[in-house]
Image (tube, helix red, strand yellow):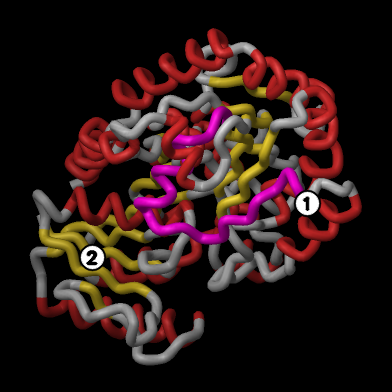
Amino acid sequence: MNILVITWNFPPRQGGMEQLLGNVCDELSKNHKLFIITAYADHSCPPKAGIFRPDRPGLIVFFAYALWKGALLLRCHRDIRVVFGGSVLVTPLVCILARIFRCKALIQAHGLDLLYPSFVYQIFIVWWLRFCDQVVANSGYTASLAKDKGALEESITTIHPGVHWQRFALPTAMDALKLERGLQGKRIILFVGRLARRKGVKEFVENSLGRIIQELPDVRFLIVGDNPKHSLIHRDDVRSEIEHAISASHLEEHVQWLGALNDEDLVKVYNLCDVVVLPILQMKDDVEGFGIVALEAAAAGKPVVATSVGGVPDSVENGKSGIVVAPENYEVMSRSIIQLLARDEIKSSLGEYAQRRVRERFCWSSTIARYEKTLSQIT
């Protein structure tokens, strides 16, 4: 089957949406021919066959280019049967092209792309969901949002993201990895993610980290990530706010900034940590659609302490692969993390179950099989 993909979010940009779409396209390209139209990238990103980008940055430029190039590809390749939109943002383009060239329209929904608080966006972008042949949601929560926004219930399918769990299994011992970073003898709490406000890192520092360190002075909190550079929505300097919170709480000696890491170093950091924290906030205009970090942590055999926000409960099985707490309940969050750091048997039990769970339920072979089934059903 030939598939036209239109997506603003795509590697080399970093983020959960970009990672998901890059992996979906890589896996689908094993059995199908893909034509991918995506956003501008600078000269550090070499051209690649089958990937088409405008020669200038900007959302309006991308929309115009995607409409023109999409029409050209569909006219030249009449055997394209599906127009696959990488997020709700491109729904109008996907539906218009699919209708004109008699293809099927499929949209991948992530969560925030359904909620963006703009009347114009909701009317001129999200409204088009009702004309899609299929909406693929990354979690049960996102599926319910899509239904609330007008997508037909029978057109909505939930497919959780997958993870290449094999690359997270390292033969190097945890203590040796800690030694590489000068963290020998320390208990490590890890956060991984772009520093959007909803991630709740500042609030975690202000309300939980100090309590944990009072009980366990050898704790170190590692932060992997930075302010989003290419986000259309997240433009605040959240890193500076977190730095101020760390300074105000006098926790500088207990926090390490690692910034954005390459894949190899990220895997090492997952493997050297003791517990991963996702202190996501409940926000009206922003949401965590799934929580791919929880799967990566599980692949490394690490338990996660997360809040029950958005699609996060789909990624963390409470009491089995980690601990899920109510948002902003920092007392319970602190106690949960202290328990995992202080009791190796509980930490190991949750981590081992999490690793088995991700290998059985979230491997890419099973995830892409669901995409294949969905594509076959609409064509």
Q: Which image quarter: residue 21? A: bottom left
* 228 in relation to 28, above or below: below
Q: At x 47% / y 52%, what residue is drawn? A: 16
Q: Which image quarter: residue 99? A: bottom left
Which label sits on residue 252? 1
Q: Amino acid at mark 1?
A: Glu
Quickly name the residue at label 2: 4
Residue 300 in percent (x, y) is at 40, 31
> Is 261 part of what is drawn in magenta?
yes
The answer to whether residue 115 of the structure is visible from this angle is yes
Residue 289 in percent (x, y) is at 55, 43
Residue 299 in percent (x, y) is at 38, 31
Magenta residues (range): 252-275
Name the residue at the right extreme. Answer: 248
Q: Secondary structure at mark 2?
A: strand
Q: Amino acid at mark 2?
A: Leu
Q: Residues within 10 Å of mark 2 (few under 14, many from 20)?
A: many
